Image (spheres, rainbow, N blue to C red):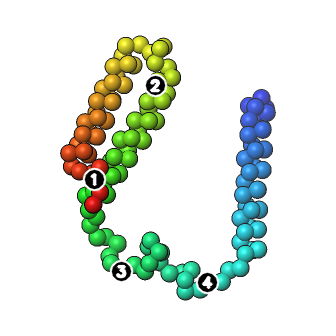
Amino acid sequence: MNVLFFEYYTILIFLAISSMLAVIIFAFSFFLTPQKADQEKVSAYECGFNPFDDARATFDVRFYLVAILFLIFDLEISFLFPWSVVLSTLPKFGFWSMIAFLVVLTVGFVYEWCKGALEWE
């Protein structure tokens, strides 16, 4: 049991020090800054102007299409870079599974293009 404790002792010290540091920084920021709640500070913030409509209003489908477009390019880059680094050592299955993934992303991109998400009015 003592061997396990000594193996994780440095991690325990690190967690204790970082927790104490976080509490100290939070306490300093709370007690050293002025805590005056004025009308501007407690008001609801929505893009720099007062809210004028219900928050549950429907959005235009183009917002969702832009989100899908972001996910397509974000996923593509986050998977393509590590794949390209180890491409020479991958077996055929690794190569063709990534090609299938790229085909799915390309189909999503073509769908976005056909829906007109790349053209904002």
- Residue under circle 3? 52
Residue at image point 36% right, 16% down: 93
Q: CA distance from mark 1 to mark 3?
A: 28 Å
Counting other residues with Cα less than 10 Å from the Cα at mark 3, is it few (<14), some (14-19), or many (20 or more)? few
Find the distance from the CA under tag 2 to the CA under tag 4. Answer: 52 Å
Residue 33, how many percent across, how many down? 73, 75
Q: Secondary structure at mark 2?
A: helix
Q: Residue at the spot x=39%, y=78% of the render?
A: 51
- Among numbered discs 1 and 3, the one appearing first in the sequence: 3
Label 1 element class: loop
- Checking the image for residue 83, the label placed there is 2
Residue bearing the label numbered 4: 37
- Please give the name of the residue rendered at 44% of the width and 32% of the height, measured from the top-left corner: 79
Residue named by callout 1: 119
- Residue 56 place in picture, x, y as percent: 31, 70
Label 4 neighbour load within 10 Å: few <14, some 14-19, many 20+: few
Of residue 93 and residue 7, the one placed in the foreground of this image is 93
Q: Quadrant of the N terminus?
A: top right
User: Where 64 sits versus 31, above or below?
Assistant: above
Front of the two marks 3 and 4:
3
97 or 115, which is in the foreground? 115
57 or 110, nearer to the observer: 110
Q: Give the CA distance from mark 1 to mark 4.
A: 43 Å
Q: Which residue type carries mark 4?
A: Ala
Where residue 4 sits in the image (x, y, percent)? 74, 31
Can residue 102 be seen in this snapshot? yes
Circle 3: residue type: Phe
Q: Quadrant of residue 120?
A: bottom left
Q: If you read the primary sequence from the N terminus, does the residue marked by circle 1 or circle 4 appear first?
A: 4
